[in-house]
């Protein structure tokens, strides 16, 4: 722990604390875990990136059905390859931390669920979302009819302006009424 | 209706979403907007524009076919409204939530961001690719403009607010850093103009305060007990099982606090003053005391009887009577306040905000546990979720198909099982009553008991614990025959029956302790303390046995003998109720046995590990998920309402109305415990500087007028708040109507 603290400058650390919802311990732990993912020669460089494949080996993400989406949403590379810098990594942990607000959590949840990145949850996104959460094997899948019915229900419940998609504010509206969301949208290192 | 069929081409989302925003005051800011993915390169938007048409044209999810399905269910002019009603005011509770949750309403800013996001999103999909380059420039300047505005807004805020606001921006770290840097730069430049030592000082002060706060926060994090275990449980069993362990930990903290208070203010002064306990020579430690709490323990500081009524003369005079009275009183009041606050906050968060009849499908989708890390648990969770989703679909279809005769049968079964369970609860209470009477006839008021006599005292707690473990099984059996429309109702029915049982048992026991025991024994408080000690210990043993037989055996049966039954699930409701019951015993006992929290502490500490092992070895993740947050609220409410309030009234009754025993304890010779205070006030009258205390006591504590006025004021406040909520409800309806109107055009 001592060595990581020295690697992460005091100014940096306080800046991280100011800009994220994480505490000092959490940031230090995150730094430790992050440097473990880096190859040896890059351990000391400040803006090293960890590729997506490496990130996905984290036990906290390994079995998450949204792992690829999480990487793509929080990565700031251009074009987006899902790799994480330490800043991105902290962003990710901050959004999933205990103290993040509902606003932040629902914003990122929306972006994670928005598979085609078009800014609204269309029927295709919803279908993928349901698949992500229920799909195990071909035979246990929801039938097309069931899926259709389910998505009709979902839209009926949340699509206030009746445009056939769920936009961010409609989504946040739904989220604000499901109290389990905040406690379940959480990943701790 | 045209808008609904135009799908991806024209997106009216932003148009309507404007009506969603409560805060329309700063219309001005709506002219500037950025896109939600502000961090991404504008070129990327152009890429996406190409992808968009394809996305909206494929399959049944195209706008047209879809909207037909949607509106066929609600044909007719008025039917939209009508149809929307069953899943109650979608929008109304949003407003309610906005009003109730200040964090959602912090100025126009968060709202504005959301609004901007909306606009940004809907702006681009319909941008013509040929105009993309043009649009790009416009976007860039828009984004810059917006950022400038944001920075201006941030500069106007105080430092603490600023940090919070920047933290809450849904942007990447780099951008937040950038914004912060600009704000800082602006601040320092303005500061250099007019150098004010005072503001600088204030800045430093607030900075150090914040540092200090951060330090405390991280210190708390280090102290977090069982962090790894909690994470493991959450990762394997999901958050609903985790609530049990969090609740257990919370109660443990409660007990540690109460132990520290009692030990620090009552026991330590006595021990410092006089270390030697006055144990008669014919009493020795026999081992059975650990179970019965009688004999040797009777002469120690464990019970009320071990404390003296003297004023201890040391460095300062320490009045034991006052210390005992005020420690217990303050502890009970603190407990009450903590309970009320945690109950209110979790009630607000989990009940007021949520809409019971709303969006079952969404609730299921949104409650996916991101903390699950176990591969098998994830698979199981997915299966369960699929089953639940299918159920939610069939529930809708099935709703109308119940005939009258079936309904009558259902009602009959409900009435029958309620009658049976009430009878069982009352019967248990009655049998405990007779058992207590029998036990009292056997026992006698002379000191050293024989080993057999001591063992006999275990009969009552044994039967009580046995009832607590066996009768709930009957209740679960009844529950199998009944059919409730929702799973939640089923759990509530089960909970209410169990609470009824425990209350009737505890009520009878308390009646016995308050009315029979004081008449029989010359030193009655320690007797009650012993009875409570026995209950706590035997309850602990039964909890251990319960998790062994309940979970281990049913696991063995489920895996080896009867695979049909399957591996058991961890029954959160039953287990939490056991904890609540155990805590109630400790609360009642606090007056009679001040060190009971120590026992309770040990009990919960060991229980945590036992339950954890039993859970990981024997149980599978729950088949039904969701509603964990609401269940937690119910648990805290239960802990407060019948149980804490009951314990408080028992202790208060003892202190106010019962005569303390004449032979032992800190209050010997007084008419009732509370008269300690009047004696103290009488003493204070002699000291001229403490006039105000006497005045307060005479004119506030003892005056009916004060309480009368207080009650009146509270009633008035309640009335005002009630009117406020009524007004808000009306407002919600109006706003909802407006949304419907807007979306129709």
Image (cartoon, rainbow, N blue to C red):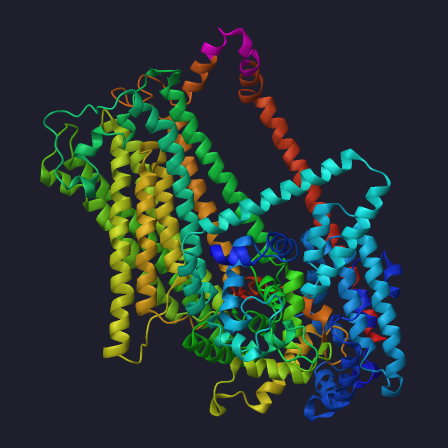
Residue B156 visible (yes or no): no
> Does residue B549 appear to the left or right of B411 in the view shown?
left
Span highlighted in magenta in the image: B682-694
Write the residue at 38% across / 18% down: B319
Q: Residue B190: horizontal and vertical position, in percent? A: 84, 45
Residue at the extreme bottom: B59
Position of residue B16 measured from the top left corner of the image (x, y, whole percent): 81, 71
Work out whether residue B8 or residue B135 is closer to the camera in this orientation and state it: B135
- Quarter of the rendering occupied by the C terminus of chain B: bottom right
Q: Position of residue B325 (x, y in %)?
A: 40, 25
Q: Can residue B683 be found in the magenta stretch?
A: yes
* Residue B624 position (above or below residue B663): below
Please say whether residue B568 is one of the residues in the magenta stretch.
no
Above/below status of B687 relative to B579: above
- Residue B744 lies in quadrant: bottom right
Left or right: residue B96 versus residue B365 is right
Q: Is residue B116 visible?
A: yes
Is A90 placed left or right of A168 in the picture?
A: left
């Amino acid at each position: 722990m001592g060595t990581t603290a020295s690697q992460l400058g005091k100014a940096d650390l306080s800046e991280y604390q100011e800009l994220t919802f994480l505490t000092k311990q959490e940031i230090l732990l995150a730094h430790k875990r992050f440097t473990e993912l880096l190859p040896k020669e890059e351990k000391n460089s400040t803006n090293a990136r960890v590729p997506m494949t490496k990130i996905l080996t984290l036990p906290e993400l390994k079995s998450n059905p949204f792992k690829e989406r999480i990487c793509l949403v929080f990565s700031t590379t251009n074009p987006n390859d899902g790799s994480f810098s330490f800043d991105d990594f902290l962003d990710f942990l901050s959004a999933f931390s205990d103290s993040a607000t509902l606003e932040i959590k629902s914003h990122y949840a929306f972006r994670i669920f928005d598979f085609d990145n078009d800014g609204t949850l269309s029927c295709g996104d919803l279908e993928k979302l349901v698949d992500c959460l229920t799909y195990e094997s071909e035979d246990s899948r929801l039938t097309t009819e069931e899926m259709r019915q389910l998505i009709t229900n979902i839209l009926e419940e949340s699509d206030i302006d009746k445009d056939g998609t769920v936009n961010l504010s409609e989504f946040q509206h739904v989220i604000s009424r499901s109290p389990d969301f905040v406690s379940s949208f959480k990943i701790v290192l | 209706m045209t808008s609904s069929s135009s799908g991806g081409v024209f997106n009216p989302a932003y148009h309507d979403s404007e009506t969603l925003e409560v805060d329309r005051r700063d219309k001005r800011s709506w002219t500037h907007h950025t896109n939600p993915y502000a961090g991404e390169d504008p070129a990327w938007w152009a890429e996406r524009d190409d992808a968009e048409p394809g996305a909206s044209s494929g399959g049944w999810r195209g706008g047209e076919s879809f909207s037909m399905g949607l509106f066929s269910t609600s044909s007719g002019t008025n039917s939209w409204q009508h149809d929307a009603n069953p899943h109650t005011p979608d929008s109304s509770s949003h407003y309610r939530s906005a009003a109730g949750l200040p964090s959602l309403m912090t100025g126009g800013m968060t709202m504005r961001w959301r609004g901007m996001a909306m606009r940004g999103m809907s702006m681009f999909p319909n941008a013509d690719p040929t105009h993309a380059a043009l649009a790009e420039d416009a976007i860039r300047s828009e984004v810059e403009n917006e950022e400038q505005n944001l920075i201006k807004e941030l500069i106007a805020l105080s430092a603490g607010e600023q940090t919070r606001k920047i933290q809450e921006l849904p942007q990447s770290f780099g951008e937040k850093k950038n914004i912060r840097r600009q704000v800082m730069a602006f601040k320092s430049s303005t500061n250099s103009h007019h150098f004010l030592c005072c503001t600088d000082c204030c800045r430093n002060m607030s900075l150090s305060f914040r540092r200090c706060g951060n330090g405390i926060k991280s210190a708390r994090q280090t102290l977090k007990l069982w962090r790894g275990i909690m994470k493991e449980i959450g990762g394997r069993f999901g958050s609903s099982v985790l609530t049990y362990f969090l609740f257990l930990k919370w109660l443990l903290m409660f007990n540690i606090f109460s132990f520290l208070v009692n030990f620090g203010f009552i026991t330590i002064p006595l021990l410092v003053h006089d270390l030697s306990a006055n144990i008669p020579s014919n009493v020795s430690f026999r081992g059975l005391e650990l179970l019965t709490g009688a004999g040797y323990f009777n002469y120690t500081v464990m019970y009320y009887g071990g404390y003296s009524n003297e004023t201890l003369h040391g460095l300062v005079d320490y009045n034991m009577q006052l210390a005992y009275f005020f420690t217990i009183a303050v502890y009970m009041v603190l407990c009450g306040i903590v309970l009320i606050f945690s109950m209110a906050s979790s009630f607000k968060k989990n009940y007021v905000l949520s809409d019971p009849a709303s969006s079952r499908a969404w609730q299921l989708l949104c409650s996916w546990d991101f903390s699950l890390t176990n591969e098998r648990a994830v698979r199981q969770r997915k299966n369960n979720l699929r089953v639940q989703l299918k159920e939610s679909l069939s529930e809708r279809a099935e709703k109308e198909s119940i005939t009258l005769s079936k309904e009558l049968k259902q009602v009959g079964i409900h009435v029958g099982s309620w009658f049976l369970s009430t009878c069982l609860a009352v019967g248990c209470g009655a049998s405990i009553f007779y058992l207590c009477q029998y036990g009292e006839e056997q026992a006698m008021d002379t000191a050293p008991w024989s080993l057999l006599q001591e063992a006999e005292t275990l009969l009552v707690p044994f039967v009580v614990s046995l009832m607590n473990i066996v009768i709930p099984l009957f209740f679960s059996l009844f529950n199998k025959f009944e059919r409730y429309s929702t799973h939640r109702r089923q759990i509530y029915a089960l909970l209410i029956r169990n609470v009824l049982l425990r209350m009737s048992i505890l009520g009878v026991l308390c009646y016995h302790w308050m009315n029979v025991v004081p008449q029989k024994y010359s030193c009655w408080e320690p007797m009650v303390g012993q009875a409570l000690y026995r209950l706590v210990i035997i309850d602990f043993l039964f909890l251990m046995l319960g998790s062994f037989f309940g979970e281990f055996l049913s696991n063995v049966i489920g895996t080896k003998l009867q695979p049909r039954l399957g591996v058991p699930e961890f029954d959160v409701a039953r287990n939490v109720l056991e904890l609540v019951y155990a805590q109630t015993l400790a609360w009642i006992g606090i007056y009679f046995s001040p060190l009971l929290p120590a026992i309770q502490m040990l009990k919960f500490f060991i229980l945590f590990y036992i339950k954890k092992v039993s859970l990981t070895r024997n149980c599978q993740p729950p088949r039904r998920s969701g509603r964990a947050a609401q269940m937690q609220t119910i648990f805290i409410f239960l802990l407060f309402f019948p149980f804490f309030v009951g314990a408080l009234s028992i202790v208060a009754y003892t202190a106010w109305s019962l005569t303390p025993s004449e032979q032992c304890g800190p209050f010997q010779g007084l008419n009732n415990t509370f008269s300690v205070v009047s004696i103290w006030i009488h003493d204070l009258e002699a000291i001229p500087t403490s006039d105000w205390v006497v005045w307060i006591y005479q004119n506030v504590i003892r005056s009916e007028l004060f309480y009368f006025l207080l009650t009146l004021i509270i009633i008035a406040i309640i009335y005002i708040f009630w009117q406020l909520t009524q007004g808000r409800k009306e407002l919600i309806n109006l706003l909802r109507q407006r949304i419907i109107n807007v979306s129709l055009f």
